[in-house]
Amino acid sequence: MQISSRFTIAIHVLSCIETFKDDKVTSDFLAGSVNVNPVVIRRLLQQLKSAGIVRVTRGSGGAQIARPLKDITLLDIYQATECVDEGELFHFHENPNPKCPVGKNIHHVLDRRLDQIQQAMEREMAGITMQDIIEDTASFISNEP
């Protein structure tokens, strides 16, 4: 199981939008920073726009962050960008053998535990904001030679 790169790319994109907010931040500019095709960025910006996290001006108008950074959590970004089926992080194999004592019971054994793991991850993500990320980024930038 692995969360796709859309999540970390979205954080990178939002960090760039904030860091370079005095300039016109276009999908081409963002793609250059992330080092991906601008189409990837445009799709991601649409997801973030649908979630109310960014505003995007058509053409070469650029992107802006739509809410205060302290009000955007990593959970918000994760929920906006990850395509998790029915909110379930873990995908269970479809057909465990019902004649096997383990196969017959594995869902009952793991469902609650996997739900606990997902809830813990989401609690942690909800406690970290884009303001935290921007502050951390600024401290790294200011310490560069």
Image: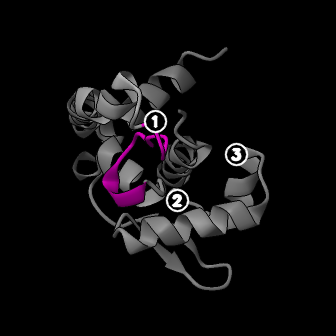
Q: Is residue 120 left or right of residue 5?
A: left
Picture coordinates of residue 111 (x, y %)?
26, 35
Q: Nearer the viewer, mark 2 or mark 3?
A: 3
Q: Is residue 27 left or right of residue 122?
A: right
Q: Is residue 62 left or right of residue 77?
A: right
Q: In this picture, which residue range is highlighted in magenta? A: 85-97
Q: Nearer the viewer, residue 67 or 121?
A: 121
In this view, 52 is above or below 131 = below
Picture coordinates of residue 26 (x, y %)?
65, 67
Q: Residue under circle 3?
A: 34
- Amino acid carrying mark 2 in the image: Asp
Quadrant that contains the C terminus: top right
- Amino acid carrying mark 1 in the image: Asn
Point 49% across, 41% down: residue? 93
Point 33% across, 33% down: residue? 104
Q: Is residue 57 left or right of residue 40?
A: left
Identify the secondary structure beneath mark 2: loop
State how far apart marks 2 and 1 are (Cα).
59 Å
Q: Residue under circle 2?
A: 22
Q: Residues within 10 Å of mark 2 (few under 14, many from 20)?
A: few
Q: Residue under circle 1?
A: 97
Magenta span contains residue 78:
no
Q: Nearer the viewer, mark 1 or mark 3?
A: 1
Point 29% across, 51% down: residue? 72
Picture coordinates of residue 79 (x, y %)?
36, 54
In this view, 42 is above or below 29 = below
Q: Nearer the viewer, mark 2 or mark 1?
A: 1
